[in-house]
Image (spheres, rainbow, N blue to C red):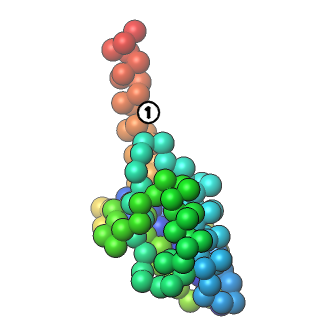
Amino acid sequence: MYLASVEDLYSRKIVGWSAGARMSKELCIRALEQAHKHRQQRDGVVLHHSDRGSQYASQAYQNLLRAYGMTASRVGKEIVTTMLVWNHSTAYSIEIWYNRQRIHGAIGYQTPDDVERQYFEEQLKGADADCQVSA
């Protein structure tokens, strides 16, 4: 089995994934669709970086990137997609261990969920401050 995953490079959280028996463009498209469903960007451009697999270069995948307003890039800063080998506990590994428990050195030895929580708390504080200034 193969796993296509989409990772938010800011928080290092896996935000979309799909598993299948073949490494196909449909597998990658399902992962991207899931990521987009859960992570629709409100503030503009999302850079998309992938490996050089034909799945990511396919017309269908590139069309979906454009439809989602994503810019394909080999040096993206926001989202990276990777193809991994599936194992029996991948869903648990991604949803529980990787996103909620595993700490990452690249994000200050915090979990992806902790980094996201802090980010959104800061956004809310900024919005509250803006509301108080304009009131």
Residue at horizontal 49 percent and vertical 53 percent from the top: 69
Q: Is residue 44 above or below residue 49?
A: above
Residue at horizontal 42 percent and vertical 81 percent from the top: 51
Quadrant of the snapshot with the C terminus: top left
Q: Amino acid at mark 1?
A: Leu
The quarter of the displayed image where residue 111 is located:
bottom left
Residue lying farthest top?
A: 135
In the foreground, 88 or 19: 19
Q: Sort mark 1 into few (<14), some (14-19) or many (20+) by Cα contacts within 10 Å.
A: few
The quarter of the displayed image where residue 132 is located:
top left
Q: Position of residue 96 (x, y in %)?
A: 59, 68
Quadrant of the snapshot with the N terminus: bottom right
- Side of 69 where 75 appears, left or right: left
Q: Which residue is mark 1?
A: 124
- Side of 6 where 109 appears, left or right: left
Report the number of numbered marks.
1
Residue at horizontal 62 percent and vertical 55 percent from the top: 37
- Side of 49 where 113 appears, left or right: right
- Side of 20 where 11 appears, left or right: left
Q: Position of residue 116 (x, y in %)?
A: 45, 52
Residue at horizontal 40 percent and vertical 51 percent from the top: 45
- Which element is circle 1 on? helix
